[in-house]
């Protein structure tokens, strides 16, 4: 651990399911606390394989424990450029399938960057996305995964804490990792719209999830190296309320004694 940052909160779970249940419990408690005050809870949501078990657990709690999402507003991190909402690989489609269609959230309370349109349209919409987050009072709790390039959202290296919602080029490793969803690497969109590192760092609380041995190297870099643009997730070291939830495989390369559990 370097001397530039305070110890991040880290929890290592025996498996992904237990980490997902923990994350769902934090999300539920923030939603219920806001509901008790008669207020909205603003959640930042992620896509990819990693948060799927969390979404399944939230759906289960909605069905069996009466967890309501009527007081929830969501902002997703990112969307591929050029994929319409009805495209099965778009992140809008993913969120509808995995979460929104299975809970009682109002459709108008769910926000995902719009990947369609020209560069000029993106620039306007990205500013509006940031304004909408501010108008909702900011993100109370942001859920994150991490890419093997060190990306959070689609903030590929280099990306620093000054970056805001914008259109970005995807890294070759990310294109290769996401080829499995598109059948072939050539079919993966080359660009995406993503919240910036700076946008993410403004969330009041963050939970980053990482599972499996493929994430072990990047988790160790992000937590143990000095924050730098080469590993965008490393900026999370500077966030006062960011907790990393990892399984044993993803935490295997960490020097555990450096972290507060
Ligand atoms: C994706 C997303 C990220 C996600 C990451 C890891 O492409 N844009 O938000 O965290 O890459 O994906 P996975 O969870 O499938 O490993």
Image (spheres, rainbow, N blue to C red):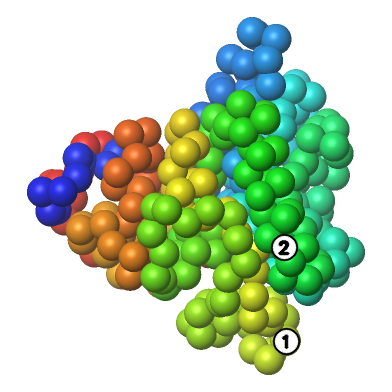
User: 68 above or below 184?
Assistant: above
Name the quadrant containing residue 78: bottom right
Marks 1 and 2, how far apart at CA: 21 Å
Which label was assigned to residue 187?
1
- Point 56% across, 77% down: residue: 170
Q: Residues within 10 Å of mark 1 (few under 14, many from 20)?
A: few
Asked if one can make out residue 249 in the rendered structure from this viewpoint, the answer is: no
- Image coordinates of residue 141 in percent, x first then y, are 53, 34
Disc 2 is placed on an element classified as: helix
Name the quadrant containing residue 217: bottom left
Q: Foreground residue, 227 or 213?
A: 227
Q: Quadrant of ligand 1?
A: bottom right
Looking at the image, residue 42 sits to the left or right of residue 1; the answer is right
User: 250 above or below 34?
Assistant: below
Q: Are marks 1 and 2 in contact (CB under 8 Å)?
A: no
Asked if one can make out residue 258 in the rendered structure from this viewpoint, the answer is: yes
- Of labels 1 and 2, earlier in sequence is 2
- Image coordinates of residue 258 in percent, x first then y, are 14, 47
User: 178 above or below 36?
Assistant: below
Disc 1 is placed on an element classified as: helix
Q: Which residue is mark 2?
A: 122
Q: Tell me the quarter of the image containing the C terminus.
A: top left
Residue closest to the far top:
37
Mark 1 vs mark 2, foreground winner is: 2
Q: Is mark 2 within 8 Å of ligand 1?
A: no
């Amino acid at each position: 651990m370097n001397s530039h940052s305070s110890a991040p909160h880290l929890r290592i779970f025996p498996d992904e399911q237990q980490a997902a249940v923990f994350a769902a419990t934090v999300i539920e408690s923030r939603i219920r606390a806001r509901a008790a005050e008669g207020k909205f809870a603003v959640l930042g949501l992620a896509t990819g394989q990693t948060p799927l078990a969390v979404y399944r657990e939230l759906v289960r709690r909605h069905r069996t424990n009466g967890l309501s999402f009527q007081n929830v507003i969501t902002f997703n991190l990112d969307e591929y450029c050029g994929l319409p909402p009805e495209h099965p690989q778009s992140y809008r489609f993913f969120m509808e399938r995995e979460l929104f269609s299975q809970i009682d959230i109002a459709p108008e309370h769910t926000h995902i960057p719009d990947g369609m349109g020209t560069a000029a349209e993106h620039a306007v919409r990205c500013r509006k996305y940031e304004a909408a987050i501010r108008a909702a009072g900011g993100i109370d709790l942001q859920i994150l995964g991490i890419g093997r390039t060190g990306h959070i959202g689609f903030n590929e290296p280099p990306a620093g804490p000054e970056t805001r919602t914008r259109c970005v080029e995807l890294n070759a490793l990310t294109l290769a990792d996401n080829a499995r969803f598109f059948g072939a690497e050539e079919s993966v969109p080359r660009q995406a719209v993503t919240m910036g590192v700076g946008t993410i760092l403004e969330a009041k609380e963050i939970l980053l999830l990482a599972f499996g041995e493929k994430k072990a190297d990047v988790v160790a870099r992000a937590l143990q190296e000095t924050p730098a643009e080469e590993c965008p997730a490393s900026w999370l070291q500077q966030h006062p309320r960011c907790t990393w939830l990892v399984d044993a495989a993803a935490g295997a390369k960490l020097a555990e004694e450096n972290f507060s559990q």
